[in-house]
């Protein structure tokens, strides 16, 4: 009888390899099998390794020892295995036997103890009523006392409504109530509107000298608050005011700086926009326009004035004659009073000014201009002022100390071209050595 043997050939033999099957008895016993089989030993059969790495060998003798061998890449490899034993077959089950006779009955057991009494059953139905017995002797007894009065029954439904009677005579007039509180004071005529005036007549601005621009023509002035002789705006009521407009002036042909200011009663109150030209003349026109805006707190009767200063080297003419040239508008910055807000934290105080720590040849511009300085204001913002003369090109102008630096890189406003890094380093990338740049800006350190 023959049986099929199945062994795992991988990784000894690769899939698809043709393997020779030898009887192990033809090999010398005890020594490992190496090299090509000796010439007299021939395979009894061959088998091919399947894709899953198994090797199936049909026609093997039960429990016979075999050797599978083949040359792989020039080297002979072997696997020894034993064919499975002959399977044992099991016969069919026999038929069920005949039941045996019944055994004799055992003796009767002793009687058990009596169990507990059961629950009482339900009560039976009441029997029928017996007949009434005869009346006893004696007459009717006396009447008993009256029982207590019962509760009052519910109220009956309401009857129909009667007709309305005639209207009575009017009573006397009541006492007059107290007068209510006076309402808020109304605005001064024209205060709710924007007052606008411009410069119409020619005006020359000398170099290096702060000059008041005399506004001489009203564009819109319902409250008649512009003084067109002196060129200022007279404040009609104490409060905050928005001042905004434009200055048009002849451009210089050499490097120059132009700054605008808002004065109140002849004293500087706010700085407007400044312009710095580091290369001289401009190619897109003969004049330069400078917009400005500021908020100022004033008392009734204060005079709001528009000023300008430049260092172009010679007198320059204002652009005049139209609203788009040199103009100033003033409007109240206050709306109706709102409810009182919560009390804020205690306010701080502004620091004393410190000089800018210039490096790389940067320095203050001489003359009447403000020297470079910085401080923290009452809000904790860093403020910088001054007109600055440029030193080494593209080099640091100064470095702010710790506590006076922005959280990220910023570019200062007003067209100065100033940049402040988070490290505190300040540069003017577009400025040329020897030119003057605007140093008026502020920033938050939060």
Image (cartoon, helix red, strand yellow):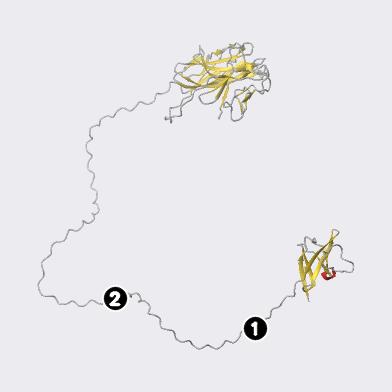
Residues 300 and 155: in front is 300
Q: Is residue 267 above or below residue 381?
A: above
- How many C-alpha atoms fall within 10 Å of the one at disc 2: few (<14), some, or many (≥20)? few
Of the 4 image quadrants, the one containing the C terminus is top right
Q: Is residue 187 shown to the viewer in this render?
A: yes
| Secondary structure category for the residue under label 1 | loop
> Would residue 293 be found to the left or right of residue 143 on screen?
right
Residue 389, given in percent of the width and then of the height, sits at: 64, 17
Question: Which of the 4 image quarters holds residue 38?
Answer: bottom right
- How many C-alpha atoms fall within 10 Å of the one at disc 1: few (<14), some, or many (≥20)? few
Q: Is residue 326 shown to the viewer in this render?
A: no
Task: Report the residue that reaches farthest toward the right.
Answer: 39
Residues 136 and 308: in front is 136
Residue 396, given in percent of the width and then of the height, sits at: 65, 23
Of the 4 image quadrants, the one containing the N terminus is bottom right
Residue 270, given in percent of the width and then of the height, sits at: 53, 19
Question: Which of the 4 image quarters holds residue 117?
Answer: bottom left
Q: Is residue 343 above or below residue 391?
A: below
Residue ID for mark 1: 94
Residue 261, given in percent of the width and then of the height, sits at: 55, 17
Residues 442 and 259: in front is 442
Residue ID for mark 2: 125
> Which of the two discs, 1 and 2, sits closer to the camera?
1
């Amino acid at each position: 009888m023959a049986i099929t043997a199945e062994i795992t050939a991988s990784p000894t033999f690769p899939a698809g390899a043709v393997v020779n099957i030898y009887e192990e008895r033809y090999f010398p016993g005890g020594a490992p099998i190496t090299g090509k089989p000796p010439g007299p030993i021939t395979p009894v059969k061959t088998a091919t390794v399947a894709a899953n790495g198994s090797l199936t060998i049909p026609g093997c003798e039960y429990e016979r020892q075999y050797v599978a061998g083949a040359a792989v890449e020039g080297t002979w490899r072997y696997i020894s295995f034993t064919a499975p034993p002959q399977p044992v077959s099991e016969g069919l089950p026999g038929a069920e036997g005949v039941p045996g006779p019944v055994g004799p009955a055992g003796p009767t057991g002793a009687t058990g103890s009596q169990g507990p009494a059961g629950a009482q059953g339900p009560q039976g139905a009441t029997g029928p009523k017996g007949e009434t017995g005869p009346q006893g002797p004696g007459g009717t007894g006396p009447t008993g006392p009256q029982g207590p009065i019962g509760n009052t029954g519910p109220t009956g439904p309401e009857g129909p409504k009667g007709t309305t009677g005639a209207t009575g005579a009017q009573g006397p007039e009541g006492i007059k109530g107290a007068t209510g509180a006076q309402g808020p004071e109304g605005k001064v005529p024209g205060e709710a509107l924007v007052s606008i005036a411009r410069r119409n007549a020619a005006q020359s601005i000398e170099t290096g000298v702060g000059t008041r621009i005399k506004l001489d023509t009203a564009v819109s002035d319902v409250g008649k608050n512009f003084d067109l002789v002196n060129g200022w705006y007279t404040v009609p009521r104490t409060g905050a005011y928005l001042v905004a407009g434009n200055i048009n002036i002849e451009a210089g042909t050499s490097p120059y700086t132009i700054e605008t200011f808002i004065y109140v009663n002849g004293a500087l109150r706010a700085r407007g926009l400044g312009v710095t030209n580091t290369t001289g003349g401009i190619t897109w026109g003969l004049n330069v326009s400078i917009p400005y805006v500021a908020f100022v707190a004033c008392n009734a009767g204060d005079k709001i004035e528009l000023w300008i200063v430049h260092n172009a080297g010679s007198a320059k003419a204002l652009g005049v004659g139209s609203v788009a040239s040199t103009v100033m508008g003033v409007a109240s910055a206050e709306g109706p009073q709102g409810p009182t807000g919560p009390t804020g934290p205690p306010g701080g105080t502004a620091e004393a000014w410190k000089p800018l720590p210039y490096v790389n040849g940067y320095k203050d511009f001489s003359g009447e201009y403000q020297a470079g300085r910085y401080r923290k204001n009452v809000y904790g913002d860093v403020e910088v002022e001054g007109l600055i003369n440029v030193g080494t090109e593209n080099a640091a102008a100064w470095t702010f100390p710790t506590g006076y630096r922005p959280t990220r890189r910023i570019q200062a406003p007003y067209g100065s071209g100033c940049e402040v890094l988070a490290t505190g380093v300040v540069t003017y990338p577009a400025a040329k050595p020897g030119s003057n740049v605007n140093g008026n800006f502020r920033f938050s350190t939060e």
